[in-house]
Image: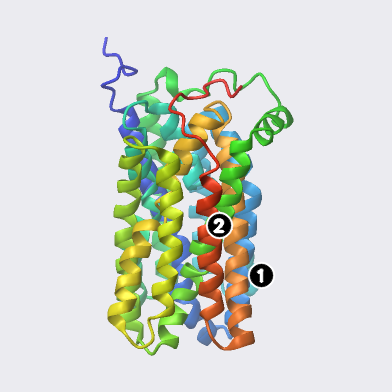
Amino acid sequence: MRQVDSPSSFLPWLIVGFGFLALALAFSARATLGLVMPIWSQEFGWSRSFISGAAAAALLVMAVVAPFAGRLVDRHGVRLTLTCGLVLVGSGCLLVSAASSAWLFLVAFSGLSAVGFGIVASHVVSTAIARHFEANRGLATGIATSGSTGGQFLIVPLVAMVLTTFSWRWSFFAIGIACLVLVPFLWWTLAARRDPQATPAAGAGTSSFGEDLSEIVRKPAFHVLFWSFLLCGYTTAGVIETHFLPYAAFCGFGPVPSAAAYGLLSAVNLAGMIGAGWLADRMNRVVLLGSIYLVRGLTFLILLQVGASYEMLVVFVVLFGAADYATVPVTASLVASHIGLRVMGLAMGLISAGHALGAAAGAFSGGYIFDLTQRYDWVWISSLALAVGAGLMVFLLRDQTKLVVEGA
């Protein structure tokens, strides 16, 4: 009888593929909100502040859900967790596609879909990868979690074509259907190839949520990784994903070149995540993660000098993209080795919640600082300082390659 739990089993790479696709769809649904914002303002009279507020509310919901999603993957594995998340994301997108009232949009996107976004998240996928890989763990994590940016690079342009050819409703409808279609394939495929590693980690059912939480927060490594990842959220999803395109317009670049630069950023981002994962298997991960933060911080010096130079904007995009989401596979690898596989889902969920809170702070602060000064200079200066601070914080860790399997 064929041993599906052998080292040559294809199951781990199936999880990599499903993780990539699930993240691509979830992150594309989030990005579609920005595409339809001007249309909704014209069609429904909804202000951009209202729509942006709905996005911020979704981030807060994601922050609350993240630890529980991590706990779910610790206890019940990736199959059930991703299935539940995809059903919620898909159902929420279908409701958005039918919405004509503000309250229904809020319930669908900032409620139902936001819970799904908190479940179909990088920390859930990276936890599943860590438990199914020993060799090439960093590379596999980088490939799987690169779906978060691969969706913006590959799927969002297709969504934009649907939007321009048909309507915004068909855009959300298409994403919703894609999520729901993926569900049975994921459920049946992983069930047919179940192996011992697909069950919860050893000892996962013997301790309470409070006991596991207490164990995690007593570890100094958790605090280093939590606070550095919170600052990471401010400097990426907070200020860049929210304010890069408005800043490009402020510099005088039109929608097409601005969107092209953002697409290039997403493409480099994908390569950066895979490259960082590959390097995490081969070098000191503390040095790698700290260096990524320092490089990211220095790129904001370039952004301060963009002015009217599109070439300078492209230089920033390439360098920042390489150091943007590259922190994810390295952070996940350090959580596995410094905190433990048994509680990795919960630990990564807490760390991801910090990232979401940092992102919400960055998104709000960027708008507030611009309204106050009519410039973005202090937005980028604050991001530079925080990214460098995150890098210096990481250097407080010591690298260790041995996994803490029992979380002790």
> x, y percentage for residue 108?
59, 61
Looking at the image, what colour scheme do you see?
Answer: rainbow
Asked whether the beta carbons under mark 2 and mark 1 sit within 8 Å of each other, the answer is: no
Q: Quadrant of residue 104?
A: bottom right
The residue closer to the viewer here, 11 or 344, is 344
Q: Quadrant of residue 386?
A: bottom right
In the picture, the disc for residue 103 is 1
Q: Is residue 165 visible?
A: no
> x, y percentage for residue 59?
60, 59
Q: Nearer the viewer, mark 2 or mark 1?
A: 2
| Secondary structure beneath label 2 | helix
> x, y percentage for residue 222?
60, 39
Spatial CA span between label 2 and label 1: 40 Å
Name above or below for residue 252 compared with residue 148: below
In the picture, the disc for residue 321 is none
Q: Quadrant of residue 133?
A: top left
Mark before the other along the chain sequence, 2 or 1: 1
In the picture, the disc for residue 389 is 2
Q: Is residue 232 visible?
A: yes
Q: What residue sits 39% from the left and 37% below the top?
A: 284
Q: What residue sits 41% from the left and 48% below the top?
A: 22
